Amino acid sequence: MLVITLGLVTKKSVVKTLHPMEENFWVNYDILFDPEDMPVVEEYEPEMLQSSLEKCDFVITNVHKLYNRSENSLLSRVKNDFFDMVIIDEAHHSVATTWQDALEYFSSAKKLHLTGTPYRGDGKDIPGEPIHTTQLSEVMRMKLVKGLRNATINNNEIYFTIKDDDKRYSIDEVIKLKDKEWVEKSVALSKECSVDVIKESIKELKKIKEISTKVPHKILAIACSIVHAQDVALWYEEMGQNVIIIHSKMSKEDRDKNLLDIEEHKCDVVVSVDMLKEGYDHRYLSVLAIFRPYRSKNAFAQIVGRVLRIIPEEEVTDYGIDNNACVVYHEEIGLDKMWNDFKREVAKSTIPPKEYPDYEFSDREYTERSSLYGGIETGEAFVADKDSFLGDIDFNQMFEDAKRDIENNVNETFNTMMKNVNLDEETKK
């Protein structure tokens, strides 16, 4: 069997799931019972011996190592009937030429396309015949993924300044002079608004960790550019958080080290730029802090998906605390519409939603933001709204109810202990 993934991070998640020496999917789900039956699972590498390749039951590769018709590419090393079955992960990408090259080569193999995004922004159909669809709302009710709530931040006052103009503009005033994108980028790139989101995300993380002390919950922070990410990381560190940055321009060695450090829980916050999107699986990401606007529903859904991986029942203190993810962003970066569309699960429609090219941010935009975009002056920050992904289950209330019940149980246990211990009143205090 060949498993094709989109990129390096996705590939590592798949390997971790299937490899017998990792979490052992085969045993955990009662598929195999005899250790001698465990499959041989390997990542494809160009230097791999042909004899090793032929011993594999599962070969896992990202598409970039597959389609290149060089001497060491997989397509050049095996016959077109080498694989009995091909599984395509993140299959909404599989109509691209790079994927089609491989699928046509292995034309006789069975194909299974898997995706959490059953439409493409360009309107092209995903290959194959649909055999199963499960809505996110359904698996959330079944507790197969985390519950989802959000907290939007705003300020009681927010003013914009424009280069070479001494006047301060309200949002209503500045929107008449500039477009919506200018306002959203100005807010996203401002330190003032970012710090308010940082504070709220840390508050949400602490609320979880105060009750669930043994689960290594983390914040995933999504930045606009590499330089922006470095500042976001610095601002988190100034508030006492341990931070790891992941971005696409890192060397393989640094990226692998940072990913390992995340797995080993050496951080409170992971700051990402164009990474850790599709397929990344780290179940302890429980707070999502978004510091950039989105126009693509697909891109927004993919990043929200990173905090939905469920933490196993045997690890949690309480489902309502540990498996109850929170999304935090500033209201003025325009994500409320994305959140509401996501709640309505636009994927239910057989007609793909209209997709727009997503915002792109360069380091230059961030470093020169004072001249390209508006300066920001803000008043006191407040939580403008709290919402729940499911209309019939209030995950915010579920969290507060679980928190209250646990605190009551702790107090009752403590009071019972105190009755049975001979201590003076001062020591009891």
Image (cartoon, rainbow, N blue to C red):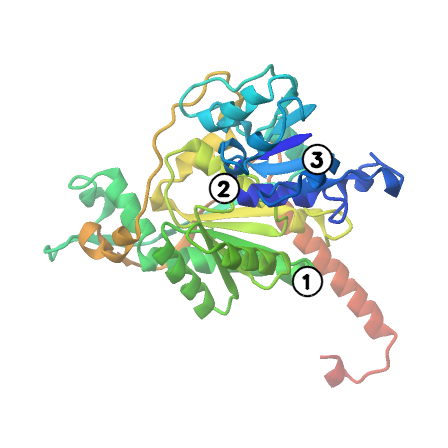
The CA span between labels 1 and 2 is 26 Å
Q: Residues within 10 Å of mark 3 (few under 14, many from 20)?
A: many
Q: Which mark is residue 58?
A: 3
Q: Amino acid at mark 1?
A: Thr
Picture quadrant where residue 31 is located = top right
The CA span between labels 3 and 2 is 28 Å
- Residue 203 appears in the rendering: no
Q: Is residue 302 above or below residue 413?
A: above
Spot occupied by residue 2 in the image (x, y as percentages of width and height): 65, 31
Q: Amino acid at mark 2?
A: Ile
Residue drawn at (45%, 60%) of the image? 199
Residue drawn at (45%, 64%) of the image? 236
Instruction: State left or right for residue 50 relative to residue 305.
Output: right
Q: Amino acid at mark 3?
A: Phe
Spot occupied by residue 52 in the image (x, y as percentages of width and height): 71, 41
Q: Which is more toward the observer, 79 or 205?
A: 79
Q: Which is more toward the observer, 184 or 103?
A: 103
Residue that mark 2 sits on: 303
Of pointers 1 and 2, the one earlier in the residue sequence: 1
- Residue 276 appears in the rendering: yes
Of pointers 3 and 2, the one earlier in the residue sequence: 3
Spot occupied by residue 11 in the image (x, y as percentages of width and height): 59, 41
| Foreground: disc 3 or disc 2 | 3
Q: Residue furthest top?
A: 129
Of pointers 3 and 1, the one earlier in the residue sequence: 3
Q: Secondary structure at mark 3?
A: strand
Q: Which is more toward the observer, 135 or 413?
A: 135
Q: Residues within 10 Å of mark 1 (few under 14, many from 20)?
A: few
Residue drawn at (59%, 64%) of the image? 266
Q: Is residue 227 above or below residue 424?
A: above
Q: Which mark is residue 213?
A: 1
Q: Secondary structure at mark 1?
A: loop
